[in-house]
Structure formats: structure tokens, C-alpha cells
Image (cartoon, rainbow, N blue to C red):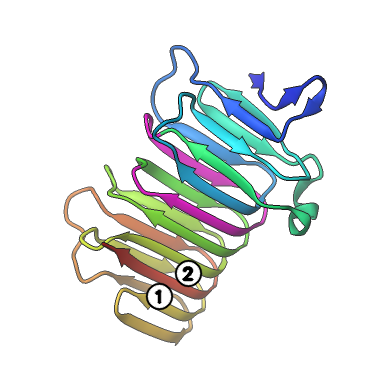
Amino acid sequence: MSVISTSAGARDPHVVVPFADGTSGVARLSFDSGLAQLGLRVDEQLTGLMAADFAHPLPLVWAAGHNVHVEYPLGSRLLHQMGPNTVRLSPAVPWAFDVHGGAEHLDADLTGLDVRSVAFHSGATHLRLILGYPTVSTTIRLTSVKDLRVDRPADVPVRLEIGKGATKVMLDDRWFGAVGGGLIEQSSRPHTGDRWYQVIVSGSADTVTIGAVA
């Protein structure tokens, strides 16, 4: 394990995570105590695995191989006080994402990134994910969500599952105003083969849009 964000004994707002020697496979970015006000981008010019610029309160960032952890020592209690944060990722490796603790105001443009999985393990609000072409069947899992938008290429099929009540759901050109007891729907393009997206919300969902980009 290596601590990345320590500089002269203090956490540094600018973080660079290098590639780990001899490490292959899927890289994983884990937010261990939530996230807020985060812009997530792909940077083809990046020479390392990840680079980030964090606002106060500053997190601790550490890595074990290509598993990168971002942890706020005070947990999610200060999420509402965070300034804007930016994380840039290398497209040289596939990525998986985990968010433990609350998540709010995430703007993630992952076009050009090989995304293998995304999981929000607590409640989330105000999320936007822009996804490119998947290389395998890829699942986005959420516990509960309010204000979620997921965009993917128009010719990539998607399946949506919501475990409990759902309100204001748009799946491409279909609208579901209020549904009790869960919702299971898929895009008009059937998911054949192993290159499609699945969005699963185990709890309730309010204001969900699954759309397409050119």
C-alpha cells in the first residue's frame, strides 16, 4: 500500500497516482466515505493512472496496485461543505467504481473509458453518467437515487430494474410517471451478445432518465 496524497505531512490538493509496476487487469477507484461536487473525466494525455484536484476538506488518497481509495477522515458529514473536485483517469486500463457513503452532485463523462462496473452502496442524488461503448455487459448498481441521468450510445441496449417505487422515469422515449412495486424495462434494441448496460436500483428511484448520445 502507498499513501499518495501526503506532502510534508499534510494532505495535498493535487494528487497523481502512477501506474503500478507489474499490475494488470481492471483498475478500481473507491470512494470509501462518500463523494460530492465531483467531476470525473477521461484524460488521454495522462501519463499516470489517475490525477485529481481536490477542494477542502481534503481527502486521504492511497493505492494498492491499481486499486485507488479516496477517504475523507470525517466521513460523509462534511459532504455538503465541499467545493468542486476533479478526477482524471487514464483510458489505458479498464475501470471499476465503488462509492461507499452518500453521493451527491457527480458529473462523470466516461466516454472513451472501458467501464466494467459502477456501484453506489448508499443513497445518491444528482448524478450524471455519460458512457461510451461497453466491451462487456456492464452493470450500474444503486441503492436508492434521486435525479439520475445515464446517457450511452444510441445503438447500445440497456436494461433498467428498480426494486421499489419509481417516479418520473424516462427510458429513451418511454415515460413512467409513477410505478409501485418495482419496474423492469429495457430499450427497444434487444440486448444480444455481451455488450450492453444494465442499471439496477435496489430501492426507490425518483427522476431517472436513461437516454442516448450521438
Q: Quadrant of the C terminus?
A: bottom left
Magenta residues span 91-112
Asked whether 102 falls inside the magenta stretch, the response is: yes
Measured as percent of width and height from the top left, residue 133 is found at 27, 49
Q: How many marks?
A: 2
Furthest toward the front, the residue is: 45
Task: Look at mark 2 in the image and give the residue it sits on.
Answer: 163
Quick check: 30 left or right of 116? Answer: right
Residue 5 sits above or below residue 175 on the image: above
Counting other residues with Cα less than 10 Å from the Cα at mark 2, is it few (<14), some (14-19), or many (20 or more)?
some
Quick check: 77 left or right of 84? Answer: right
Residue 113 sits above or below residue 126 on the image: above
Q: Residue at x 54, y 44 (%)?
A: 98
- Give, as a three-letter code, the residue at label 1: Leu
Quick check: 69 left or right of 161? Answer: right
Which of pointers 2 and 1 lies earlier in the amino acid sequence?
2
Measured as percent of width and height from the top left, residue 83 is found at 72, 52
Measured as percent of width and height from the top left, residue 107 is found at 52, 56
Measured as percent of width and height from the top left, residue 62 is found at 65, 27
Furthest toward the top, the residue is: 22
Q: Residue at x 65, y 37 (%)?
A: 70
Counting other residues with Cα less than 10 Å from the Cα at mark 1, is it few (<14), some (14-19), or many (20 or more)?
some
Looking at the picture, tell me which residue is in the foreground, 41 or 132.
41
Asked whether 36 falls inside the magenta stretch, the response is: no
- Give, as a three-letter code, the residue at label 2: Gly
Task: Look at mark 1 in the image and give the residue it sits on.
Answer: 183
